[in-house]
Image: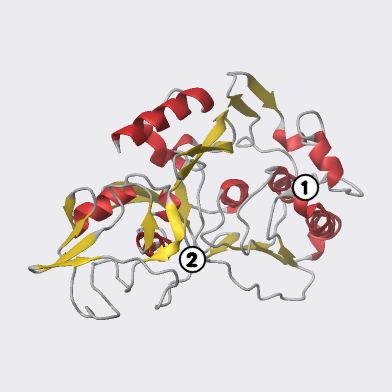
Amino acid sequence: MNNLILQINKILSNYYPIETTFNNIHNLSHFWIISNDWNKFIPFQININGDILTGQYKNKRIKQVVTNKIYNWNEYLLLYTSILNIQWHPCIDENKFLCLIHTYNFLDNLNIKKIIIKDDTIDINYIPVQNYKLVWTDNIKPNIINKDNHFYFDSFDINKNHEKIGTQLMRLIKNRDKYNSIHFHLDNNGGGDIVPAHLILRCLVGKKEKWMKNIQKILTNKEIVEWDCWKEENGYNSDQVKKLNLDLLPDYKTKYTGKIYLYMNKKNGSAAWYFITYLIYAFSAHIKRFTKKCYGHTFKFGSIDKTGQLIIKGYSGTCSGDGNSISIKYNNIKIDCPTQQFINCSIKKKDWNRFWIE
């Protein structure tokens, strides 16, 4: 682990534009350590408490795990979560975390070689195919409602999805005030470009509000770029706007007065999270912010008053204002490190890394 920490500190120094260290990687939403071999699985299923659910040792509880050291079960969980992006933390996505601990790990101190059940020590012989059911994906099958006031954005990646984004945007721009309510579906939207979020909010809000600030971001080379993100057609992102092939841009002078329904899921991080947060700032009656401690970490959550103009459904991902990661190979693992950071924008500092829940 010490060598990994040294390597991560070196990578952060070379690529992340603001000085930080390994101890802060939990606060970087685009920093990921990928260290699992998805062709090797523990031969039985375990739950978050260390109970064995299948196989020869079913109904037994793991007392200790042996990697390059001996850890009790909770110590092992704490060690594992110390290198995880918070979106894979068991308090946020227990299913993904369980998938991870069932796979072979290239990091010696996380690779389970033996388990100890009471006084019995059992060797772990990894198998190539699960003989139990743990599914990594959290993609949901969209329930398409064929009504004009329902808008579907399953990606904000303009390069890959510009036609669909452009079509949905034009429907909204042309027909906003025909609807008593508007429904936004972010099924499986993991982000992409922030431009669509700005254009949609501009369409809904009308005149620019006080909370809507310019963006300043710092790059790896320490260059600081600033632009008016509420006029994306001018300057920094103008080429991305052109790719959407819009017949006209939002130019409303008034704010939308109907109800807005927003359907979220845990995949909604990055640009999708900005969109969610913008809607909350613009249309929520009251924001409740709170924290929860779990497995050695403190997590930030937020919800809104259900009597307001905006109704949120589901559970969002999050973002910390960083982005544009570069992938670096280190031994058998991959490290994704962000190369830019927003240093000023419309997001309040207290809301970075906040998960929005209904």
**Mark number, residue 193:** none
Amino acid at dot 2:
Trp
Quarter of image, res 9: top left
Quarter of image, res 167: bottom right
Q: Secondary structure at mark 2?
A: loop
Q: How is the image coloured?
A: secondary structure
* Residue plotted at (43% across, 72% down): 134
Tell me where residue 78 appears, x and y as whole percent: 26, 50
Disc 1 marks which residue? 159
92 or 53: nearer the viewer = 53
| Whole-number angstrom distance, CA of label 1 to CA of label 2 | 26 Å
Is the N terminus in the top left, top right, bottom left or bottom right quadrant? top left
* Residue plotted at (84% across, 48% down): 244
- At label 2, counting other C-alpha atoms closer than 10 Å, the crowd grade (few under 14, some 14-19, many 20 or more) is few
**Mark number, residue 136:** 2
* Residue plotted at (43% across, 49% down): 35
Left or right? Give the position of 62 relative to 38: left
136 or 155: nearer the viewer = 136
Q: Secondary structure at mark 1?
A: helix
Q: Can you see residue 173?
A: yes
Tell me where residue 12 appears, x and y as whole percent: 46, 28
Residue at the right extreme of this rendering: 247
Q: Earlier in the sequence, mark 1 or mark 2?
A: 2
Tell me where residue 301 appears, x and y as whole percent: 41, 52
Look at discs 1 and 2 and give the one toward the viewer: 2
Left or right? Give the position of 260 relative to 92: right
Left or right? Give the position of 208 relative to 342: right
